[in-house]
Image (tube, rainbow, N blue to C red):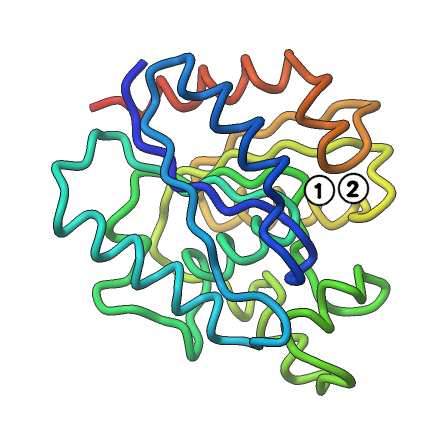
Amino acid sequence: MKATVFLLAGGGYHENSAEETCLVSRRLLNKHVVVVPIKYSVSPCLYPMGHNDVCSYILHYILRNQTIRPAILLGLSAGAHLAATSVLTEGQHSSSPPLVSLLDGIALWYPLLSLIPPTHEISVRGLLGQNPSEKKRQSLSISKETLRSTKIPVFLAHSIDDPVVPVSQVRSFIELLKYHKFDVDYYLTTDGGHGMKFLSNKEDVWRRFEQWLSSLSP
């Protein structure tokens, strides 16, 4: 299996999880996938610095390297929120050309998708600082108002018992993507929790993701 995976680890916008980066990298490198971890700005740096980091890094990487295709962006938890809002929405972080035109797919694992309460407030503060306005929260939540019209294949993986991100967020997002005719594949597991527990114990999710990645091959 040949592919390039740009990786955004989680960490609640307060860190780039080294554990997640190492585990995902080891798994995919064993499958002969090129893994490109991106270390993005986190608190006390606020939006749009992390988003600008991601857009700039991927743009320059693809322009300067013979990138193996398919090239996808894989985000975990808050990193998945960063991936989704960088690729699927427009805002202060929008790049030229847009990331959606440079990538062949986007994968979101146990993703934070909404900043509207109830949500993971630690991540909200890490991204937007203390007491962000409702307008700012809404602008960085995935919704019918913020979703780009440009289509890209999307893969989602989430656990029904996730204690951090309610599965209702993911189900609503899946329905939104289907309504707007996105090519969406997803895997919801009954038990898996969030973060390292999910990555370490869900062989079925890994297999489904690798099948999806292989399906994107030119």
Labelled pair 1, 2 in contact (Cβ < 8 Å): yes
* Residue 63 appears left or right of 15: left
Q: Identity of the amino acid at label 2? A: Val
The residue mark sitting in front, 1 or 2, is 2
**Cα distance, mark 1 to mark 2?**
6 Å
Q: Residue placed at 47% from the left, 28% from the top?
A: 25
Q: Which residue is mark 2?
A: 167
Residue 94 placement (x, y as % from top left):
36, 71
In the picture shown, does residue 131 fall above or below 123?
Answer: below
Identify the mark at residue 171; answer none if there is no mark: 1
Residue 15 placement (x, y as % from top left):
63, 56
Q: Nearer the viewer, residue 49 or 111?
A: 49
Q: Residue placed at 86% from the left, 63% from the top?
A: 118
Residue 3 placement (x, y as % from top left):
30, 26
Assign a secondary structure to mark 1.
helix
Assign a secondary structure to mark 2.
helix
Residue 50 placement (x, y as % from top left):
48, 66
In the picture shown, does residue 101 fall above or below 146?
Answer: above
Q: Residue placed at 56% from the left, 41% from the top?
A: 108
Name the image quarter holding the C terminus.
Answer: top left
Q: Nearer the viewer, residue 100 or 54?
A: 54
Q: Nearer the viewer, residue 186 or 95?
A: 95
In the picture shown, does residue 29 fall above or below 150?
Answer: above
How packed mark 2 is, by other alpha carbons closer than 10 Å (few <14, some 14-19, many 20 or more), is some
* Residue 202 appears left or right of 149: right
Q: Identity of the amino acid at label 1? A: Arg
In the picture shown, does residue 209 fall above or below 31?
Answer: below
* Residue 5 appears left or right of 177: left
Q: Nearer the viewer, residue 98 or 18?
A: 18
